[in-house]
Image: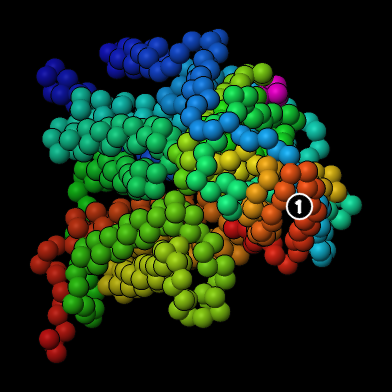
């Protein structure tokens, strides 16, 4: 009797945990959608089309008539509603994790995600009430990416695969490198995050078209730095080169040394593919003079690159034993 | 799971109640301060300058504005950025920007407000002159929502929403600023330009690029400024009952490139 109860409990627990994992995945997808909708607000310059917050033209935001969702209000109000929905999902996610999850650190991570989404909501309100100051708008953009990473991490940590233990990954015999894969992945993630910071700075200082030609800059490799806008824009281009190099390095490293590990190879391939899409979107943003959909797709693809890199980094840290470290070349 | 559902429903209800006002309640009008006093009454304008702002070069074809984002904006609109009629450039602001005639003087702002109306999702007028301390009254003449968003550098940004037709919001600019753009973020094509002056001597060119600026006797620096074609300045001295002609010429090649 007790044995059957125990088995039933286990099955029930497993079912709930799979549910939690799927819910976290759903929240992550909704967050990507939210980043897209938020990107649309900036791309269409609709950020101040609803001057009040948390109300909308004096209405309760959830009761604002659909017939009045016109022009820029459509983008800003939709952003607020999708944000509220994601906030609500995060609340459920935190509660669900807190109740069902045994690992204390995962519970704390879910609480951190809830805190982050709340801070993000307040920052969103401040951007409206303080009339889009660059620092607040940037913080709002960057915290969105941080929150996205947190939800992806929770999705990963609640996956059955993670809980059952990821396989240990050993590098191919003939691979040599002075940098461990986990360290390389972490550096790539840091580079992508920094690039997203620069992208946010570029968007919120209106520097997106400070250099109107591409791939050259004012017909030169290095532009004349006549204004801070040009410097910001050019730093984003330099950042793209660094990020590209890091991603290609990470991809090639996994292809050469960890080819047989699907859990590493797949995200590396996805990240590598997204990189080319992102570069094409970045170039098209300039060529199209910041066409709304292209620019916004550039923002959301950036978030996806970051998210994939975070996933890969977390897996690499877990799968690659610390002793693997570097197979230091003989000349060192 | 039942507890979870109960909690979720409770939180949803709480959010609905806490996050805003009554859905049927119209937003209250934030009353702006009244016109400030102080300074001298404007002197009698016994003289005037008049003339034409001519436009040289190829006149850009007015771009048709895509207004489908708001079904309430039914009228076909074209860009007012370059409005040329009979060879003259409209919406050029001509004003006294200096000179002995105004040096060291301060002028009390008029008690009557300057008005902007929003009709068919565009501003009327497109360019206007106001004095520091004078009230600006912005009316929503449309059956849709607008927000009024000033983009001043010397003056603080003002952003206020108008949820209903015939709402009027008032505002006062405390510092001189030329040009101060006004935009509506709901309808991204809506733009107006304001010259906030320290004196009452300013006007805007109309049909055919014609203008007339009434002045007291004195020596003045006159500036003509346009949102796209930049500004030009000249000096003039007028005596009582003088009616002097001063023409300005703006060239298509002077156009500032947009971002």
**Residue that badge 1 annotates:** B82
Front residue (pair B109, B76): B109
Q: Position of residue A330 (x, y in %)?
A: 13, 87
**Quadrant where the C terminus of chain A is found in the figure:** bottom left
Asked whether residue A70 is in view, the answer is no
**Is A279 placed left or right of A171 in the picture?**
right
Q: Chain of mark 1?
A: B
A6 to B97, vertically: above or below = above
**Element at label 1:** loop
**Left or right of B225: which side holds A258?**
left
For residue A101, side relative to residue A242 (left or right): left
Seen at 69% across and 28% down, the residue is: B117
Q: State the image coordinates of residue B169 (x, y, percent, origin top left).
A: 57, 23
Front residue (pair B121, B170) = B170
**Where residue A69 sits in the image (x, y, percent)?**
60, 27
Q: Dot 1: within a 10 Å radius of its alpha carbon, few (fewer than 14), some, or many (20 or more) residues?
A: many
Quarter occupied by the N terminus of chain A: top left
Q: Quadrant of residue B162?
A: top right
Q: Residue B5 at what x, y percent from top left?
A: 34, 15
Which of the 4 quarters of the picture holds residue B137?
A: top right
Q: A221 and B84: which one is in front?
A: B84
Q: Give, as a single range, the part of the protein colored magenta.
A: B140-145
Is most of the magenta stretch helix, strand or loop? loop
Residue A243 visible here: yes
Residue drawn 52% across and 74% down? A217
Q: Is residue B142 magenta?
A: yes
């Amino acid at each position: 009797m007790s044995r059957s109860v125990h088995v039933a409990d286990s099955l029930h627990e497993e079912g709930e945990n799979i549910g939690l994992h799927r819910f976290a995945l759903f929240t992550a997808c909704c967050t990507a959608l939210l980043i897209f909708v938020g990107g649309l607000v900036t791309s269409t310059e609709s950020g101040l089309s609803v001057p009040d917050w948390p109300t909308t033209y004096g209405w309760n935001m959830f009761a604002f008539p659909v017939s009045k969702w016109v022009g820029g209000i459509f983008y800003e109000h939709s952003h607020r509603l999708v944000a509220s929905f994601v906030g609500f999902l995060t609340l459920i996610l935190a509660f669900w994790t807190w109740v069902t999850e045994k690992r204390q650190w995962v519970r704390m991570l879910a609480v951190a995600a809830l805190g982050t989404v709340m801070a993000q909501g307040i920052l969103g309100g401040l951007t409206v009430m303080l009339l889009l100051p660059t620092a607040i708008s940037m913080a709002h953009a960057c915290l969105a990416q941080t929150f996205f990473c947190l939800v992806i991490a929770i999705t990963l940590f609640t996956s059955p695969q993670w809980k059952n233990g990821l396989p240990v990954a050993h590098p191919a015999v003939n691979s040599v490198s002075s940098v461990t894969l986990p360290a390389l992945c972490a550096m790539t993630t840091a580079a992508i995050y920094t690039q997203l910071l620069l992208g946010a700075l570029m968007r919120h200082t209106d520097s997106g078209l400070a250099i109107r030609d591409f791939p050259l800059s004012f017909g030169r490799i290095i532009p004349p730095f006549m204004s801070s806008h040009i410097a910001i824009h050019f730093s984003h281009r330099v950042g793209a080169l660094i990020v590209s190099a890091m991603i290609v390095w990470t991809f090639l490293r996994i292809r050469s040394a960890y080819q047989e590990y699907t859990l590493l190879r797949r995200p590396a391939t996805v990240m590598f593919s997204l990189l080319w899409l992102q570069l094409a979107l970045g170039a098209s943003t300039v060529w199209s003079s910041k066409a709304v959909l292209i620019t916004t797709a550039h923002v959301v693809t950036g978030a996806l690159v970051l998210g994939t890199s975070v996933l890969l980094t977390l897996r690499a840290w877990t799968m690659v034993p610390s002793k693997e470290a570097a197979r230091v070349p003989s000349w060192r | 799971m039942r507890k979870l559902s109960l909690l979720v429903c409770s939180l949803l209800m709480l959010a609905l109640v806490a996050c805003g006002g009554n859905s049927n309640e119209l937003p209250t009008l934030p009353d702006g301060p009244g016109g400030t006093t102080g300074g001298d009454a404007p002197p009698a304008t016994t003289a005037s300058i008049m003339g034409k702002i001519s436009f040289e070069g190829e006149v850009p074809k007015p771009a048709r504005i895509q207004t489908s984002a708001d079904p309430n904006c039914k009228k076909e609109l074209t860009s007012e950025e370059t409005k040329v009629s009979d060879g003259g450039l409209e919406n050029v602001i001509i004003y006294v920007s200096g000179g002995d005639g105004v040096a060291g003087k301060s002028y009390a702002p008029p008690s009557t407000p300057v008005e902007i109306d929003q009709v068919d999702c565009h501003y009327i007028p497109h360019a206007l002159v106001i004095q520091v301390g004078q009230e600006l009254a912005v009316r929503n003449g449309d059956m849709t929502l607008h927000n009024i968003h000033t983009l001043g550098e010397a003056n603080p940004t003002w952003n206020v929403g108008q949820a209903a037709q015939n709402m009027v919001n008032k505002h006062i600019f405390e510092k001189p600023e030329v040009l101060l753009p006004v935009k509506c973020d709901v309808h991204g094509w809506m733009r107006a330009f304001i010259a906030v002056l320290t004196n009452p001597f300013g006007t805007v060119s109309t049909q055919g690029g014609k203008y007339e600026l009434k002045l007291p006797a004195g020596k003045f620096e006159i500036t003509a400024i346009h949102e796209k074609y930049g500004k030009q300045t000249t000096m003039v001295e007028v005596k009582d009952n003088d009616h002097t002609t001063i023409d300005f010429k703006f060239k298509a090649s002077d156009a500032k490139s947009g971002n």
